[in-house]
Amino acid sequence: MSTVRRRLVPYFLLGPGTIWLVVFFVVPLYYMFKLSLETGLVGSLEFSWHWANYSDALSLYHSQLIRSFVYAGIATLVSLLLAYPLAYAIAFKAGRWRNLMLFAVVAPFFTTYLIRTIAWETILGDQSPVTEFMNAIGLAPGGKVLATGFAVIAGLTYNFLPFMILPIYASLERVDVRLIEAAKDLYASATQSFLRVTLPLSAPGIVAGVLLTFIPAAGDYVNAQFLGGVGNRMIGNVIQSLYLSQSNYPSAAALSFVLMALIMIAVVIYIRFAGSEALMGEEAQ
Amino acid sequence: MAETQDQTQSVVLDGVTKRFDSFVAVDDLSLELSRGEFFTLLGPSGCGKTTTLRMIAGFERPSAGEIRIEGDDVAALPPHKRPTNTVFQSYALFPHLSVEANVAFGLKRKKVGKDEIAERVATELKRVGLAADANRRPSQLSGGMQQRVALARALVNLPKVLLLDEPLGALDLKLRKGLQVELKRIQREVGITFVYVTHDQEEALTMSDRIAVMNHGRVEQVAVPEEVYDRPSTTFVAGFIGVSNLMPASVAGTGQVRLDQGQTIATSTAGFAEGQRCHAVVRPEKLRVELLDGAGGTDADQTRVEGIVESSLYLGTATQIAVDLGGGVRMTVLIPNADEAERQRLPGGGARVALSWEPEHMHIVSESPNGEGAQEKQDLETTREVDANA
């Protein structure tokens, strides 16, 4: 009796999460998928296995798809380059300032994402001191920063940076400093002990940070809408406008599935690579 | 630099002091270690032994003084440029690397050839009995095996000095005993100077060629194990090594010591002035105990004191009897349980007894210049608690 109950406990614990996932993920996904194969306009949609929605979406919007991945990729890389030294400093050098610095990392979340992005619209505006300064040092050709790809990537980087910092910090913070001492005791210079010990041990944080930054950045439309121009539209903007302006639900749904599939492919390739011994720091024998 | 350098010297510490802010961890320490010696730094926690080891390894810079390894002043060298390797208390094995890669780590940094690395790593793993586990991760190994990997990882580099920071501290007693013997065997085999840090006096006595007993950042005695045990130079050393039987006394004249309990005993008083206060030490296993019934104890035997049995503890191989001599002086007697009938006749609590010993088993020590160690006091406390419960 009690053994039966004990065996059922895990299922009870899994229950709420499973129900949540089914109601708010699986069911909507099913309806979205159905929608992506329908034809017609709002009010008179008809399910007709219309796979052409997919081929049309790809042929019409492939440039925005590619741009989304390029922007998200650059933003992820820049975030990584900014986040790692910062996370390292917080984990190993901050001392009593550690908590304050961590608070500073998450502080932007106290304001909504949208407001912060709109603030960047002002900061990067044509008359702003930032733009004038960048123009003066030759970084803003034509005196324009806003409505360029640079502005969109900068916005993506800014908005998703904390998602890169926090997991890297978490993995660095767990690195046992005695291991670094051991590396130095075994003739490794400071650089070598970083490359051979600290970096490999923080790899899980880098993998998590890259995923947490790249995935939302690739599907983002807010940054491109406020900071980009006509030529900087990302796939998120297309989906948004298909849904909200053009009421072309089937195309929007098909495009969403294309995006989802591409992101999943990218993630699987990345994890296979990142999970390999090479990135985990196994020394080649 | 090395004008007076003796060819047999390995590590030389000359007036080394280490201060952390106002705290003096190591105070004007001078030691000379011979090549191939198993040298132990023994003392309670906080006595400065680990700080000393870390200064030899290069993890701490001395505030003053000089450290030379085979004649070279290493003070300015960072750890990775010193001819030393360390076996850490926590092993500090790299969790992301296999056993083999852990052991090869130092040789790779030294740019040793691939074939030579493979060969030396294999030899070293065989030496510590882990040849079959080369491809496993440290997390898949037991504590004792991890300790062997740590040892192999250090030894494979053939350092001039191997530093061991309580390497057996985390292991259970049986494993520790086995590894003590093995460590000693390996040390003889490779002939490398070992500097071994421990707070375990038994471990120190078993393994060392010489022991430096440390207290409050200073060395109280440097000697071979037998001498540290049989002829401790201070009350601290006497107390830290084994159970202390300290009887307050004063020097009555050349070769004469008067115990506060009344007897005057002939013993060497070299290094002591007449009238100087001191303590007479007799090891617990050197004491004989004899029941006093009625008016006994008036014979002329000089080397005896009288007291009341406080407690008697059965320890398995021996019986430990605590005797109160009065005036706050307690003596511990250890009697081997060789004969059951004899054990049954041993005096119990409350009995009046006489303790006697051969004069050559007693010698006098000076008061420790650095105060009594916290460890010793703690040990006495625990002994008292045990006694109270018995």
Image: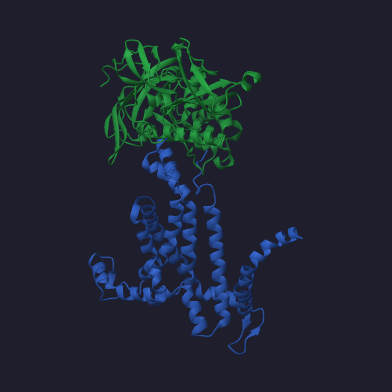
Chain colours: A blue, B green
Which residue corresponds to the image point at 35% horizontal and 60% vertical from the top-left?
A100
Q: Among all residues in the image, which is located at the extreme right?
A: A1
Q: Quadrant of the N terminus of chain A?
A: bottom right
Instruction: Tell me where residue A54 sits by quadrant.
Output: bottom right
x and y percent of residue B156 in the render?
48, 29
Determine the residue located farthest toward the left in the rendered image: A136
Q: B40 or B195, which is in the foreground?
A: B40
Query: Is residue B37 visible to us here?
Result: no
Farthest residue in the bottom direction? A43
Q: Nearer the viewer, residue B155 or B380?
A: B380
Q: Quadrant of residue A138?
A: bottom left
Q: Give the vertical position of A68 relative to B303 (above or below).
A: below
Horizontal and vertical percent for residue B351?
54, 25
Query: In screen coordinates, is B80 left or right of A280?
Result: left
Q: Nearer the viewer, residue A106 or B340?
A: B340
Which residue does the image show at 48% across and 77% down from the upper left? A238
